[in-house]
């Protein structure tokens, strides 16, 4: 059985690059539980809160429910659901899943394969991460679902139809003159930049190209906040800060809240700025909530 192939082809609703990571998040959670206890089952009423937290933090901005993947993942052949009445999911309704004592777990054949090939779990988890989330979120997502993975290269797990362009980082950092586009940070050790990264505006996992007009040079902090939807970029190439972000310390105010409405730093003349369609994708699929008003100078 080609389990990696099944994971790569999960049926997901999609339209125009819309994110729908419901099934991948449930699978990552289930793999984490399997790693801790191979015989465990996930009772919907017990894990609903945890699954909702994952969807809220790592899913798209629109409201959603964990009942959807709990039911629909069965059709992909990697998941099974039982209730107090027997085998089979009772539907997608939150109430019916609770009232029937619905429990879910990885399909029997998959559990057997994972027991017989221990490295398969890590390969499946890394494939899910590579296909649905940017690298900046992988470590904390594993921590959130209780997965412990050995360090490994993940590029070979991504379907061969696309390969990352290793030149992108240098091209983007050069375009922004090795300065964070949000705060201007430009740290180096000798001649080597440290803490600067090339961020995809439209995520690579969602067909974002490895082009300068889909990139921003960001410091590590602002890259993480950009990928978490705390920060964004508007049509005027000014910084958006989500009203959902809360930080009362002087550091939080200075490094995040005070960015609201500031123009991006760069790119240098002759380099392509972030393309409008990539900005629009990030605003609709990643940025959370309403932007804060621009702060006074």
Image (cartoon, helix red, strand yellow):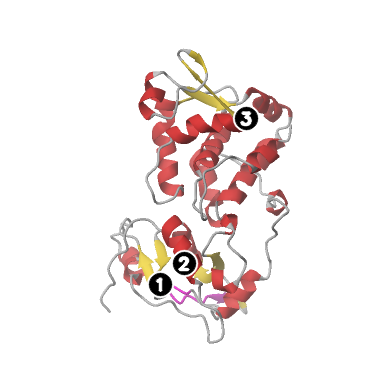
Packing grade of label 2 (10 A; few <14, some 14-19, many >=20) is some
Q: Which of pointers 1 and 3 lies earlier in the amino acid sequence?
A: 3
Residue ID at (60%, 33%): 76
For the N terminus, the quadrant is: top right
Q: How many marks?
A: 3
| Residue to which mark 2 is pinned | 279
Is residue 185 on the magenta stretch? yes
In the rendered image, residue 214, in percent from the top left (x then y), is placed at 55, 69
Q: Are marks 1 and 3 in contact (CB under 8 Å)?
A: no
In the rendered image of this protein, does residue 176 appear above or below residue 279? below
Residue extent of the magenta highlight: 181-188
Check disc 1 and report its element: helix, strand or loop: loop
In the rendered image, residue 231, in percent from the top left (x then y), is placed at 40, 63
Q: Are marks 2 and 1 in contact (CB under 8 Å)?
A: yes
| Residue to which mark 3 is pinned | 77
Q: State the mark number for residue 235.
A: 1
């Amino acid at each position: 059985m080609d389990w990696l192939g099944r994971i790569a082809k999960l049926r997901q609703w999609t339209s125009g690059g819309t994110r729908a990571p419901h099934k991948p998040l449930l699978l990552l959670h289930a793999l984490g539980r399997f790693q801790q206890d191979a015989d465990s089952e996930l009772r919907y009423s017990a894990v609903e809160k945890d699954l909702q937290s994952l969807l809220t933090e790592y899913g798209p901005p629109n409201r959603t429910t964990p009942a959807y993947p709990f039911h629909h993942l069965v059709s992909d052949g990697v998941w099974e659901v039982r209730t107090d009445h027997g085998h089979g999911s009772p539907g997608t309704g939150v109430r019916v899943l609770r009232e029937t004592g619905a429990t879910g777990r990885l399909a029997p054949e998959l559990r057997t394969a994972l027991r017989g090939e221990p490295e398969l779990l890590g390969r499946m988890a890394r494939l899910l991460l590579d296909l649905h989330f940017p690298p900046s979120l992988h470590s904390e997502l594993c921590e959130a679902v209780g997965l412990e993975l050995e360090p490994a290269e993940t590029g070979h797990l991504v379907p061969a139809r696309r390969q990352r362009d290793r030149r992108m980082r240098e091209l983007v950092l050069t375009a922004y003159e090795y300065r964070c586009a949000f705060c201007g940070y430009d740290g180096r050790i000798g001649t080597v930049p440290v803490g600067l990264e090339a961020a995809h505006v439209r995520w690579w996992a969602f067909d974002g190209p490895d082009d300068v007009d889909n990139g921003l040079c960001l410091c590590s902090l602002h890259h993480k906040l950009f990928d978490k939807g705390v920060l964004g970029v508007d049509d005027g190439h000014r910084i958006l800060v989500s009203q959902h972000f809360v930080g009362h310390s002087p550091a939080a105010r200075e490094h995040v809240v005070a960015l609201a409405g500031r123009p991006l730093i760069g790119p240098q003349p002759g380099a392509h700025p972030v393309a409008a369609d990539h900005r629009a994708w990030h605003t609709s699929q990643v940025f959370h909530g309403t932007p804060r008003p621009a702060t006074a100078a």
